[in-house]
């Protein structure tokens, strides 16, 4: 069965000022003039999509005016309004619950003591009503995750000197409960409510020494009382569990999936202190009120299709390691940095997507001169970005058994900041992996260990038939509703038939269908 992306009825909206154009290509698209990359978009299922950006307008002494526009599924604007957001805050994360959208804004740098440095904005996209709640957090705090359940919100943050903060807030009364972890170096991996919103699950990596850590699942009530703390301890003392993602099963049971290595208590190489710890495979664990039911580890080199997943550059190294292991009967692993996605749950199947990358540098030489005028060469390294080379996808059943593994090659994608770019979608029989890069949707269809057809590249339809793309970087593509997806990003276009043919930079939003 051949799977393709196709596009639906086209019209274009320009900002400032509105214009409509139709080229008969069948795509739905909106465009905004973009002098800078300031636009944000949150898909809201069958209700539509929320687009917003910070304007230049001052709402008052402490707030900037942000513009919010809500579109229906035909990308027709239903309403727009200005909402005040504390100055200096930037958008970091969203949660969609039906018609309720929760947007979190944060300033992780130093701010005035009398101005909130985190703000939760609650928008009802149907009624166009909004509420906002201010929160004080430590300086230079990094948000791991947040969730809202009913009138309760929980925020999980890591901050300077290896500390962690879990902040529970009643959105109706404003009451806050803070749970600090400061005795040992601690890093929060994930935090979630249970399905009823009555308990909070937090996965923490606690370091007993600079190199040795252990993973714990802590359970709290919404009043901040600890119900339990369970160590998720593998059978081998050198195994280190990392990158934990929580999937609540019921009120007392969770599944935890992530990556691991055998480096607990040591480093794999001298320079790894600067690069962070890498992984050699994936794990799945089930934890109940009674304790850990199982922890199962799966090494990347044990995947029977590992050589089919990797791109050509990485494949050379892996084949060398496999050949060496076979000859010398060794178990030398392969190590990768992973960006782990939120889990996809399909009936009794857990699907985990992880993007593999490595930091890339180049060396620069320059010449300086000593007191006597003699030339002295000086060398330093420059960070070029994170080079993405593969997306891995693995499936587990409820007993922790590996159902299948697969993946997708990523070519020439270099980003200055880590962000999740590959998307996954599962229909009744197949799984689709895809990403938006340089104005194309790159997609691959898999069925367990098999590949269905070839990797496809589908051009994203432009606003005018004579538009020529000059530049386009890494865009986003997300599942919207049903078999529809939404792709968005920035393009620099030129059109000789329009107003002098000068270049224009736009923020675009395209509706795509998958069939």
Image (spheres, rainbow, N blue to C red):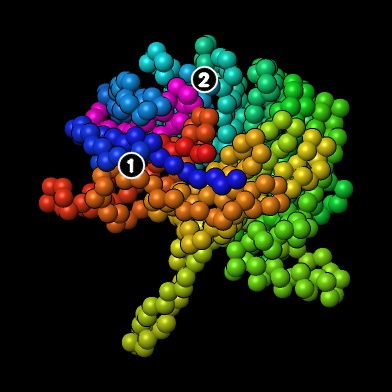
**Residue range (magenta):** 39-58
Earlier-in-chain disc, 2 versus 1: 1
Report if residue 513 is visible in the image: yes
Compared to residue 56, the image places residue 499 above or below, namely below
**Which x, y percent locates residue 212?**
75, 51
Compared to residue 129, the image places residue 320 above or below, namely below
Query: Between 119 and 283, which is closer to the camera in this rendering?
Result: 283
**Which x, y percent locates residue 364?**
42, 74
Q: Which image quadrant for residue 211? A: bottom right
Compared to residue 278, the image places residue 77 above or below, namely above
Mark 2 sits on what residue?
98
**Which x, y percent locates residue 304?**
76, 58
Compared to residue 440, the image places residue 203 above or below, namely above
Q: Which image quadrant for residue 322? A: bottom right
Left or right, residue 467 beside residue 418:
left
The quarter in which the N terminus is drawn is: top right
Q: Residue at x 47, y 53 (%)?
A: 457
Say if the magenta span includes residue 153.
Answer: no
Query: Between 437 and 385, which is closer to the camera in this rendering?
Result: 437
Q: Residue at x 73, y 36 (%)?
A: 349
Say if the magenta span includes residue 45.
Answer: yes
Left or right, residue 483 beside residue 121:
right
Q: Main secondary structure of the magenta part?
A: strand
Mark 1 sits on what residue?
25
Query: Between 350 and 102, which is closer to the camera in this rendering?
Result: 350
């Amino acid at each position: 069965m051949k799977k393709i992306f196709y596009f639906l009825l086209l019209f274009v909206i320009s900002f400032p000022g509105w214009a409509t154009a139709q080229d008969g290509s069948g795509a739905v698209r909106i465009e905004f003039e973009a002098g800078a990359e300031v636009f944000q978009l949150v898909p809201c299922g069958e209700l539509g999509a929320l687009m917003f950006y910070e304007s230049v307008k001052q709402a008052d002494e402490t707030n900037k005016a942000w513009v919010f526009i809500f579109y229906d599924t035909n990308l027709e604007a239903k309403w727009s309004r200005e909402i005040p957001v504390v100055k200096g805050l930037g958008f970091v994360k969203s949660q969609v619950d039906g018609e309720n959208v929760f947007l979190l804004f944060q300033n992780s740098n130093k701010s005035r003591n009398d101005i909130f440095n985190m703000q939760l904005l609650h928008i009802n996209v149907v009624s166009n009503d909004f509420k906002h709640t201010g929160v004080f957090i430590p300086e230079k705090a990094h948000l791991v995750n947040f969730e809202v359940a009913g009138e309760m919100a929980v925020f999980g943050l890591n901050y300077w000197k290896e500390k962690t903060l879990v902040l529970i807030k009643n959105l109706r009364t404003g009451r806050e409960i803070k749970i600090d972890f400061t005795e040992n170096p601690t890093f929060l991996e994930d935090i979630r409510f249970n399905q009823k919103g009555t308990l909070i699950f937090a996965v923490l990596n606690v370091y007993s020494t600079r190199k040795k850590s252990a993973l714990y699942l802590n359970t709290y009530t919404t009043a901040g009382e600890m119900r339990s703390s369970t160590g998720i301890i593998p059978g081998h003392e050198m195994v280190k569990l990392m990158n934990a993602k929580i999937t609540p099963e019921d009120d007392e049971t969770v599944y935890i999936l992530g990556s691991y290595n055998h480096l607990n208590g040591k480093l794999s190489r001298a320079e790894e202190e600067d690069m962070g710890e890498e992984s050699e495979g994936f794990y799945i664990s089930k934890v109940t009120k009674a304790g850990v039911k199982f922890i199962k580890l799966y090494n990347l080199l044990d995947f029977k299709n590992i050589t089919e997943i990797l791109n050509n550059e990485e494949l050379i190294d892996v084949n060398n390691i496999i050949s060496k292991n076979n000859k010398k009967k060794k178990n030398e692993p392969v190590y990768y940095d992973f960006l782990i996605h939120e889990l996809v749950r399909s009936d009794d199947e857990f699907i985990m997507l992880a993007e593999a990358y490595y930091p890339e540098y180049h060396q620069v030489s320059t010449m300086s001169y000593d007191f006597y005028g003699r030339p002295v060469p000086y060398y330093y390294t420059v960070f070029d970005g994170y080079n993405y080379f593969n997306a891995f996808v693995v499936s587990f059943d409820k007993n922790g058994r590996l159902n299948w593994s697969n993946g997708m090659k990523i070519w020439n994608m270099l980003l200055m900041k880590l962000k999740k770019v590959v998307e996954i979608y599962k229909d009744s029989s197949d799984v689709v992996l895809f990403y938006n890069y340089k104005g194309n949707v790159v997609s691959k269809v898999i069925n367990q260990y098999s590949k269905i057809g070839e990797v496809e590249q589908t051009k994203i339809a432009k606003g005018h038939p004579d538009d020529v793309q000059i530049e386009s970087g890494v865009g986003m593509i997300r599942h919207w509703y049903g078999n529809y997806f939404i792709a968005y990003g920035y393009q620099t276009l030129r059109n000789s038939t329009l107003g002098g043919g000068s270049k224009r930079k736009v923020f675009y939003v395209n509706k795509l269908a998958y069939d």
